[in-house]
Image (spheres, rainbow, N blue to C red):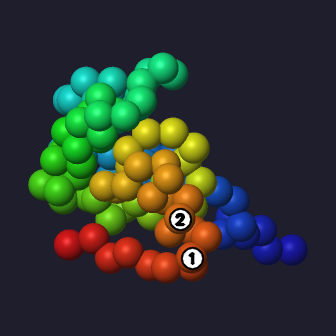
Amino acid sequence: MNSTISRLPMPLIDSYEWQFDGACRDADVATFFSPEDERGSKRLAREAKAKEYCAACPVVASCLEHALRVQEPFGVWGGLNTRERTDLLASGGVRHAS
C-alpha cells in the first residue's frame, strides 16, 4: 500500500509565510483591530490608517485570500474591514488586489 501525504494540511509556515512580507508586520496591531467600544469617526479613522498599510502592501492579495477563506471575523485584512469582507462573500464577488 502506498501512503500519500497530499491530503494532509500544509505545514503552518507554508500557509502563513506571506505574513513575513506584510507592510503591517511591525505596525501596532491595534491599528487593525477595533476596541469593543469604538464607533463612528474614530473607527473610520483607524480603519483608514490600517488600509494605508494595505495599499502599499506586497502581500495584500494573500492577506485578503486568507481572511476570506477562514472568514476572519475581526479587523482589517487585505484592505477590507469585517463588513466589507462579509459583503464581498455574500455577493460572491472577487476583488483582485494590485
Q: Residue 91 got which mark?
A: 1
* Residue drawn at (20%, 29%) of the image: 26
Q: Say if residue 68 shows up in the picture.
A: no
Contact (Cβ within 8 Å) of mark 2 with mark 1: yes
Q: Say if residue 86 shows up in the picture.
A: yes
* Residue drawn at (57%, 44%) of the image: 73
Instruction: Identify which residue, 83 or 65, lies in the foreground.
Output: 83
Calculate the distance from the C-alpha at mark 2 to the C-alpha at mark 1: 6 Å
The answer to which image quadrant residue 35 occupies is top left
The answer to which image quadrant residue 94 occupies is bottom left
* Residue drawn at (55%, 59%) of the image: 86
Q: Is residue 58 above or below residue 13?
A: below
Q: Return the x and y of residue 29 as percentages of the image width and height.
A: 32, 27
Q: How many residues crowd mark 1 within 10 Å: few (<14), some (14–19), many (20+)?
A: few
Q: Return the x and y of residue 5 as percentages of the image width and height.
A: 68, 64
Picture quarter with the C terminus? bottom left
Q: How many residues crowd mark 2 within 10 Å: few (<14), some (14–19), many (20+)?
A: few
Q: Return the x and y of residue 55 as percentages of the image width and height.
A: 17, 56
Picture quarter with the N terminus? bottom right
Q: Which element type, helix, strand or loop, lies under badge 2?
A: helix
Name the residue that disc number 2 marks: 87
Q: Along the horizontal axis of the image, is 97 left or right of 72?
A: left
* Residue drawn at (59%, 54%) of the image: 71
Q: Is residue 66 above or below residue 72?
A: below
Instruction: Identify which residue, 47 or 59, lies in the foreground.
Output: 47
Q: Along the horizontal axis of the image, is 28 left or right of 43?
A: left
Q: Which element type, helix, strand or loop, lies under badge 1?
A: helix
Q: Is residue 31 above or below residue 67?
A: above
Residue type at mark 1: give it: Ser
The answer to which image quadrant residue 3 occupies is bottom right
Q: Residue furthest front?
A: 40
Residue type at mark 2: give it: Asp
